[in-house]
Amino acid sequence: MRLMSSRRWRFVTLMGCLTITTGVAAQPVPSSRSLVVLATTDVHGHLRGWNYYDARPDRARSLAAAATIVDSVRRAHPGGVLLVDAGDLLQGTPLTTVASRASIATPHPVIAAMNAMRYDAAAIGNHEFNYGLPLLRRVLTQARFPFLSANATALDPRDAFPAWRLIRRGDLTIGVIGATTPGVMVWDRDHVRGRVRYDAIAPALRTAAAAVRRAGADVVVAVVHAGLDGAASYDTVSSGLPGENVVGQLPRDVPGLDLIVYGHSHREMVDTVVNGVRLMQPRNAAATVGAATLNFTRVAGRWRLTSSSATSLQVDGHVESAAVLRVTEAAHRAAMAYAAESIGVSPVEWRSQLARATDLPLTDLVGEVMRRVSGAQLAASPAFSLDASIDSGTVTVAKIARLYPYENTLRAVRITGAQLHAFLEHSARYWNTWSSGGTSSLVNSKVPGYNADMVVGATYDVDLSKPTGQRIRALVVNGTPVIAGDSFTIALSNYRQTGGGGYAMLAGAPLVYESRGDIREMIVDAVRKAGRLDPADWASVNWRIVPAEAEAAAKASFARSGNERRSDGAPFNGTRLRVIGMNDFHGAFETRLGANGRPLGGAGAFVAAIRRAQAGCIAPACYSVIVDGGDEFQGTPASNLAYGRTVVTLMDSIGVAASALGNHEFDYGQDTLRARIAQASYPILSANLRDTLGNVPSWIRQDVIVQRGPLKVGIIGVSTIETPNTTRAVNVTDLRFIDPAPVVSARAQALRAQGADVIVVTGHVGGFCTAGATCTGEIFQMVNRLTSRVDVVVSGHSHSYLNTRLRGVPIVQARSRGEAIDIVDLAIGDSTAWQAGDINASRVLSADVLDVMADTITADPQATRIARRAVDAVASIIAQPVGRILTDMRRDGSQYALGNLVADAMREAANSDIAVMNNGGIRANLLAGDANFGRLYEVQPFGNTLYTLKVRGSDLRTYLSRLVAGASLRAHVSGVQLRFDPARPADARLIDVRVGGKAINPKRIYTVTLNDFMVMGGDGLGLAGVALETTPNEIVDLDALIAYIRARPLGVAAPLVDRIVPVTP
């Protein structure tokens, strides 16, 4: 038989209960009956299952789908249903924005939908005032039901709201009373000042409850737009206003209540009873319908409430009401057109996930627009949404609307240095205090993210190791430290300027600028005027979290989890697939220090980060799959001396589903590679690998389908076509690496035909994205030329940070050596775009590359044991002392001291005139201190042997000219100095060559030392065809480096870097 989902079972059970409790017609005077109260709240304009920001269906949030639930309940319980809403209906999506601008004669789509659903009553929410009282008054006249607010007092009768309404269901009389949070007096002060006053909720509801009881109510239902409990977001002392979140007190403070339906806080409460009164808050954005069943018994001729229960009915999975769709169609079309309007183009993707933990261009954009429009010195604004992003390419109104979702207007005030400092300290309350080794969340759950402002135009540190009120350090404006008596102008939203968020220090600050236009439209106008949205035009370095460990912990607080919420607070409720990616592990079992001295990676921390990502993905709502982008083995003694066996053991323990075949997988030879493939319980894939006859080799797989719950995940592996030039050529002479795009397209289509729900490409194929948004490389060329849809690409090979999208496809790469992981969440389900085969449609919910900071995560014990065994097995070899390094030598840029040191060691070992070392063969930093075999092995792990070549001076000059002809320098030299003009054509850049301090002699024969990888053409740095003689030295490159260091018992300092010198004549 077919089993029902739990959600569907609850719905059918409710229907059954309602049918059972309906009065029987044969009983003229029933002794019992029931009433079902259906409720919504904080709908915020989500009338239809459509996401205007991303232009895609959103079945999880739809008042039209809620209408279908309401109709079903009414059919099951005729004459026994009450439908109410707890407020915040008229603002929240592009649909409501467009509706606010419509002509007076046009019916408001929210009211039209609610009329079609036959609502009985609604509370006034604070966002109902966002567009002003004239619009609200017009909207209310269109409603066929009352909007209630008992604690409002209107000076103009036209602005008055009723406190209560009696509603009859048969012989049952229901009193519905309403109330609104007094915060309206702060947040929309300009709209209500002198017209409407809001007082405390409890006294007003006491009066209203007593009134409806006197009027004959058998049961009293309160619809209240206020939170359950907690401090107000405004300063109640300076504002003189009552509390914001008081619902939890009402069952004790207001006699006579039977049910409270409340909203405002966007936190669902399904079934709670306080002091005998049932409380219920449905999920916001029309994601659920709250359903409370109230059971009555007739006592002395009156109905008395004897019991109650409540449940939550999700709208996802329900068809949308034709009646609601019909009355909202015109507004829907207008909203889609408004949201899709192109206003500019961005060369780069703008992200906001970490916007509260680090200064990002996306938040700077908002602040800079506010500052420039107002003329203020400073500007303050929060990161409203951590899901907001602007993809590279066309920028639409919808993207800006998500970035700034509220109808706030712009103001500027004059403040002192003391006020600025107090303002920033108040904002810093968003964080808990950090302590080394602490495991609790750094985010203070009592402070909403929209009340944590960041200031543009000043620089400052937020020291989270200090207690609240003592965190702001190094506060500087215009290069001068701020003192208490300084004076500044600061741009703010009207919400903040009037005290919203509890920023009491702004009270009394003189107003110097005011605009009636809303900030969102100012941002839209700024982007439209600029045309090109470049971060360089808006971004500035304003603030940072200190110390560095606290910053890392703050960033970690925003790692994606299975219950993340969208920008309006509504969770994503559909099934998702979480793709967890890694690449270029290179046998990095042990933690290493980053450039800033912080410990990165290490098997224990790396796997712990993966486990944390898995823990945030809980079935059946979410399923995860782990893929690897290749180059697992080569790189450390613990891996290389075991020929990669230890790494495969680790990857098996992680649960890798599939790995791409990397170029360094060939470094031990094909026989060893095949042994590792046989050892691994996961497949190592390469769809574009062929033998000399053009066939797929029998020992490699192109792709695989893995099962994750009900999902079939197709995974395609790809190898870089550069493999013959990036491993020893002799190891791949019988293989060919073909163009991956046609192959991936064909395999994606084949996997779809085999039932794959999702296609993941894991490719040892690299690329880079510059700060100016230009992305180049093999991976981007491949994705640009795909003719079949893939859903995500996990990249490797280039050891770069990639987190971008091309043609709707997220492309991620997590640097290397286990120092970061990729987390990409994909929505699973059908849509028109996918069904139509649109290869540019995107399923991505989020895509992140998260650093693995070993000091902010507890190491995974199993991975730690595997790593310890691998390292201990070679410990005696690793520990062999070699010498002392006097200065840090890091691989920074394209020319660095460590590269010169390696080249010097090669030249000295071979006793040659010149040595050239490819940058790709230098794999780790060499830090000051005692150097043992293990540390040097990580610098040069490939075991390449040295060759000496004899070359005529004229040919040598041509070869050296090639070294400076590319877009970047890819080699280091010893024994020679090159001067070149990068502005000249590639073949004419070399200006001067000095060998041993003398000008190169075109007729002289010079000796040149290269490693065997280069001799065979690796990295395009060989001397094939021009060498007069090539002689193997039988010296391994690592041995040459060790000998060089041992020959200097007093220690080795960093060689001078200036050997390949760019000049401007």
Image (cartoon, rainbow, N blue to C red):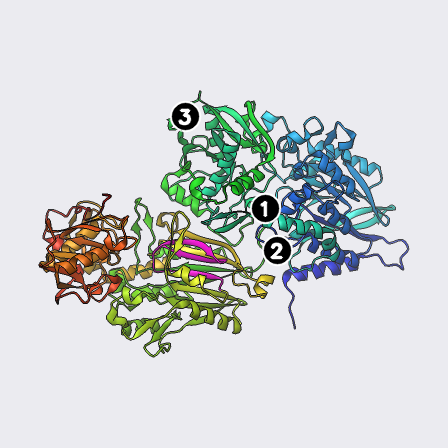
Marks 1,2: beta carbons within 8 A:
no
Q: On the rendered structure, is 542 left or right of 262?
A: left
Q: What residue type is labelled 1?
A: Asp
Q: What residue sits 18% from the left and 62% below the top?
A: 1011
Rendering coords of residue 241 (x, y %):
64, 28
Whether residue 122 is visible here, answered yes or no, is yes
The question of residue 799 being in magenta is answered with yes
Q: Is residue 1042 left or right of residue 548?
A: left
Amino acid carrying mark 2 in the image: Asp
Disc 3 and disc 1 in contact, CB within 8 angstroms: no
For the residue pair 241 and 1056, the one nearer the viewer reads as 1056
Give yes or no for residue 740 being in the magenta stretch: no
Q: How many marks?
A: 3
Give the residues drawn in magenta, as a range. 790-815
The structure residue drawn at horizontal position 66% and vertical position 35%, both measured from the top left corner, is 181
Q: Where is residue 322 in the image (x, y as percent from the top left)?
A: 74, 57
Binning the other alpha carbons within 10 Å of mark 1 as few (below 14), some (14 to 19) or many (20 upward) gives some
What separation in Å lies between label 1 and label 2 (alpha carbons)? 13 Å
Disc 3 crowd rating (10 Å Cα; few below 14, some 14-19, many 20+) is some
Q: Name the residue under label 3.
A: 482
Query: In the structure shown, which secondary structural element does the residue marked by tag 1 occupy?
Result: loop
Instruction: Name the residue tied to disc 2.
Output: 58
Magenta stretch, overall SS: strand
Q: Is mark 2 on a helix, strand or loop?
A: loop
In this rendered view, identify the residue nearer to me: 727 or 396: 396
The quarter in which the N terminus is drawn is bottom right
Three-letter amino acid code of the residue under disc 3: Val
Q: Residue 568 carries which label?
A: 1
Q: Compare marks 1 and 2 and give the one earlier in the sequence.
A: 2
**Residue that appears at 63% across and 51% down:** 336
9 is higher (above) or lower (below) than 752? above
